[in-house]
Image (cartoon, rainbow, N blue to C red):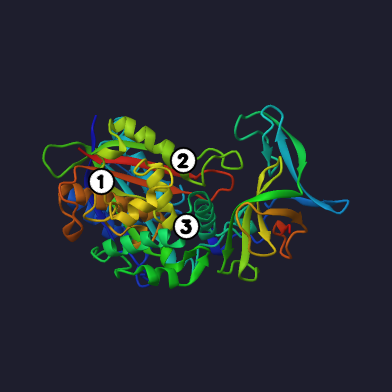
Amino acid sequence: MTATDAPRVVADPRPVIVEQGGRHELLGARCVSCRHALARRTPRCPWCRSPVEPAAFGPDGAIWAVTVVHVATGDRDVPYTLAYLDLDDGPRLLVQLDRAAAVGDRARLAAPAPGGDPAAELLA
Amino acid sequence: MTVAVWGVGTSRFGRQPDRSAVELAWDAVQEALADASVEEVDAAYVGTVFEAPGVAQRALSGIGLTGIPIVTVENACASGTTAFHEAREAVRTGRYERVLALGVEHLTSRFDGPITPERTDPEQASGLLLPALYALSASRYMAEHGATPADFARVSVKNSRHGALNPRAGRRRAVTEEEVLCSRMIAEPLTLYQCAGLSDAAAAAVLGPARRGEHDVPVRASVLRSGTAWDQRSAHVWGYDIVHATSARAYEEAGIGPADVDVLEVHDAFTVGEIVTVEALGLAEFGGASRRVASGALSLGGDQPVNPSGGLLSRGHPLGATGLAQIAELTWQLRGEAGERQVPGARTALVETMGGGASGVDGNGCVVAVLGG
């Protein structure tokens, strides 16, 4: 098998974001021992190896780093803005932003982008 | 037992549509065998990321290296140095005597632009191309240290000057800071000339117990590790901690410190990568690498030349071949065979390669090796 004739269907590995009463939340997990917040539900905590329990995070957070991507990948229109959003008391999540931003800006989880990428909107 | 590099070889680097991965491997392996003065090896470790299964056997059978154990390894950008590390361990522990490490990659027959994101990975499936991952590091680095895009561009200027002296490099033109900054934007603040290009190549080394004579280059240390988790708990930008931890163990094994290194080949797939790596290796204080680049300390003629070959930015980055090309360059440097790129009197050399791409992991693999002395 090669990269070009790989199976056409793969399970969507992207983080799960749902709308709950008008707010968007990330369905992640929290370590039962060290309380570390995880963006996905893995069997164990990657830092202390304890079990984890389901937890929801968001919607608000602070931008840890941000870039504007100018080369196309998949169906995304370029340019598009990508940021690591550190959710308050939650995990770091890679999101598409609605516009350019600076490190430290506040943002809020939003409905996923048209292609399904996690997304957030800048606050103020 | 002290293990030594007996011989090295590489194909030419660059876009080579008329030559196959197998043919490129023949160039590298035959040169390495001749350089080592051996006809055969007892085993082979082969690093590649995107080549088809069986590429190692197809290549090695064509030059009569059959019937031996052949192990193919993948560790993203560090696949070649992982093959080198395993070959050294195999000799050191007495498992085999003469071992070939080979890296091979024909990237331009697989990709047109940046390497396609891996759709089974959470972040890559969310649009995170590798240049964007490094751009996010650059964004954070600028916010923390007040660095500017020019600080990154100067890495390309430096390495392109070195690469212009390297007859095997894919890009052999020295570029100016303005050219770098004005080249096409890829992922802000990284422009095209700050990204290693797609390239096709193979590189190889033959390792064995150290023999008498000046030709063999001793391997004083080699350390391989994978990254810890990388997320909101991490204190540094992506890739810093794995390089720091791997190099700390390599310095300890070699019995040296960062100041004792005369010449280095490090992972500059993107300019910011060299900046972060130079700090993680302890060659500059936290936030201080860009000043050492700007001062010329890391250029040929400076205190500690980094990437005298021109680095990945000049060679191009054929993933599996990269690490062994780094080993080849440092072998030539330590023997005094590097021609116009020679670092006078180089006695101790360090190679670092870090490969990544798995979400939430601070690098899939990193190898730091110390040669010479």
Question: Amino acid type of disc 3?
Answer: Phe
Please tell me which residue is depicted at 33% across the width and 68% down the height of the picture: B171
Question: Amino acid type of disc 1?
Answer: Val
Give the image location of residue B233, x and y in percent: 60, 38
User: Which numbered dot is residue B263?
Assistant: none
Give the image location of residue B155, x and y in percent: 37, 59
Whether the residues at callouts 1 and 3 have beta carbons within 8 Å, the answer is no
Give the image location of residue B236, x and y in percent: 51, 43
Q: Quadrant of residue B71?
A: top left
Question: Amino acid type of disc 2?
Answer: Ile
Viewer-proximal residue among A43 and B179: B179
Residue B198 in view in this figure: no
Whether the residues at callouts 3 and 2 have beta carbons within 8 Å, the answer is no
Residue identifier under label 2: B242
Same chain for the residues at labels 2 and 1, yes or no? yes
Number of residues whose C-alpha sits closer than 10 Å to that of mark 2, classed few (under 14), some (14–19) or many (20 or more): many
Same chain for the residues at labels 1 and 3, yes or no? yes
Task: Tell me which label, 2 or 1, sits earlier in the chain.
Answer: 1
Viewer-proximal residue among A69 and A7: A69
Task: Tell me which label, 1 or 3, sits earlier in the chain.
Answer: 3
Q: Nearer the viewer, mark 2 or mark 1?
A: 2
